[in-house]
Amino acid sequence: MRRPLQKRFARQAQRALCVAVVALGLALPGVPIAQQAKRAEFTLDQVRILAQQALTHKDPELASHLALGLLEADPDDAGALFILSQARFMAGDHIAARKASAKAYRLGASRKDRVRAAEMAARAALHEERPTLTQLWLRRAALNVEDSVAMDRIAADYALVRRINPFSFRIGGGLRPSNNVNNGADSALQVIDGVPVVGALSGGAQALDGTVGTLDIDLAYRLRQSKTSQTRLGSRFYMRRIWLSSDSKAQAPELENEDFDSTYLDVSLTHSFALGAEGNTASVGFRLGRAWAAGSTDYDFAAVTASRGIKLSPSTRLTFAVTGEKRDVESGAVFDQTRLQLNTGVSHRLANGDRIGLSYAITDADADHINYRSTAQSLRGTYAFDKAMGPAKVSASLTFGQTQYPDFQIGFIEVPGGREDRSVYGDVTFFFEDYDYGGFAPSVRLRAGQRDSNVSRYESSEFSIDFQIRSTF
C-alpha cells in the first residue's frame, strides 16, 4: 500500500526544510534548533510558504530546492513550477527559468496563473536576448488578461521590445464578400464611345460575385542602426484567393477559382536616415520580386525607391516618394513595362485628436504593346476619428482615379482617341478594439465604388464587406 503523499515527501525534503527552519528563524521558543530539525515534518502548503519566504529573502538556492521537492511529490504542480522559475531567474539561469515558466503556463489552472507565468517567461526570454520569443510570450499573456490595466501594461512592454528587436513582422489578412471579385464589366454589351460593337462579352468577362481571401505578411530585419540612420532587409508575401458563388459558376462554367489566384513576393533593402531639421527623414531602397497569376508566373520586376518626409509642425507631416520599376512579363517581351510613380501626401492631427490626410499619386507606364501604355492618377482623402463611436473606432476615405490609354485596341478595333477610365471609391472602416483577444481585434470595412469608361468592357461597380483581424498594439 502506498504511503500518504505527505509522508513520502517529508523524507525527501526533510533536509531542505530543516535548513529552512534555521535560515528563516522559524524555531520554536525554548526548543533547541537541532532538536527541532530532527522532528521537522511539514505539509505541502507549509513547504510552499517556506519557498515563497526564501524568494522574499533572496535565497534562490533554497527556494529552488524546496520547489524541486514539491515537484517530486507532484510533477504537475504549476505553483511549484512558478516558484522554480522565479528562483532560477533570480539565480541568473534564464533558460531554466523560461522552461519552468512555460510548463507552469501550460498547467496553469486559472487565467491569472497563466498571465504571471507568461510574463515571467517573457522576462526570461528578454534576458536571453531573444526579443521575438519575448513578444510571443507577451502575446500569450495578453490571451489571458482579464482587465484593461493589465492589457495596457502588456502593450507597453510589447512596444518596448518591438523597438529593441531587430526583427519585425506584420501579418494581415481578411475575407471579403463582393459582387465583383474579378473586376468584370457591368454589362454583356460592348460599346466604344457610345457605338455598339458586334458581339457580347463572355460570362467570365462580366462581374462575378463571390468571396475574396487575402494574406499579407511583411518581414524585416535591421542590419545596422545608429542615432540617425538604419538599414533594413525586408520581404513581403501577398496572396489573394477567390471562391466563386454558385451563380457565378453557372454564369462562367469554363472558369475555376484557381483562374483568379494571384500571389506576390519580394525582397528589399532600405536605408533610412535623418535629413535636415529635427523630424525630417529620407530613405532609398531597392526591391526585387515576382508576381504570379492563375498559378503561373506573370512577371518579374526590379524597382528602386526614394522618399522624403518633412515635419511641417508637431501635428503636420508632408511626404514625397518616387519609384522606378522594370517589369519583365512572362507572356512576351512586347508586354514588358517600364513604370515611374510619384506619390505625395500630407497628414494632420487636429486639436481633438482626429487625423485627416490627403494624398496624390501619378503613374506612367510604357511598353511596346499599346494596351500596356498608360498614365494613371489618383487623389485620396482620409479621415480617422480619435474617439470611438459606440463600440468602434471609425475611419473613412474617398478615392478619385483616372487612367488614360493614349492608344488602345479591342481585338482588331482601334479605339478612337484611346481609352479613358474614371473611378470613384469610398470606404468606411470600423475597428472594434475593445473586443480584442490576445491583442487582436476585429475590423470591418464597407467599400463601394464605380468605374466609368468610354469602352464599356471596362465599366464596373463593386460593393464589398471586408472582415479583418488587426493588432491592438
Image: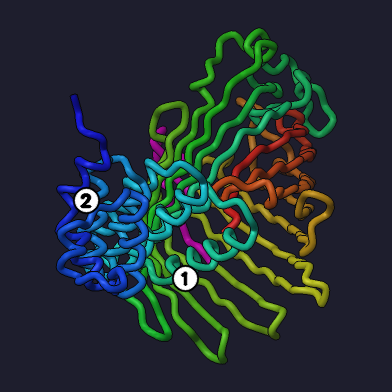
Displayed quadrant of residue 459: top right
Work out whether residue 98 or residue 158 is closer to the camera in this orientation and state it. 98
Residue type pointed to by label 1: Leu
Mark 1 vs mark 2: in front: 2
Identify residue type, mark 2.
Answer: Gly
Label 1 to label 2, Cα distance in Å? Answer: 37 Å
Q: Nearer the viewer, residue 335 or 291?
A: 291
Q: Is residue 432 left or right of residue 339?
A: right
State the residue at coordinates (64%, 53%). Answer: 375
Instruction: Label 1: state its secondary structure.
Output: helix
The secondary element bearing badge 2 is classed as helix
In the foreground, 160 or 267: 160
Residue 218 position (above or below residue 280)? above
In depth, the one of 297 and 208 nearer the eye is 208
What span is in magenta?
322-337
Q: Earlier in the sequence, mark 1 or mark 2?
A: 2
User: Which residue was labeled with disc 2?
Assistant: 69
- The answer to whether the residue labelled 1 contacts the one labelled 2, judged by CB atoms less than 8 Å apart, is no
Question: In which quadrant will I find the C terminus?
Answer: bottom right
Rendered image: mark on residue 160? 1
Residue at horizontal 20%, vertical 33%? 3
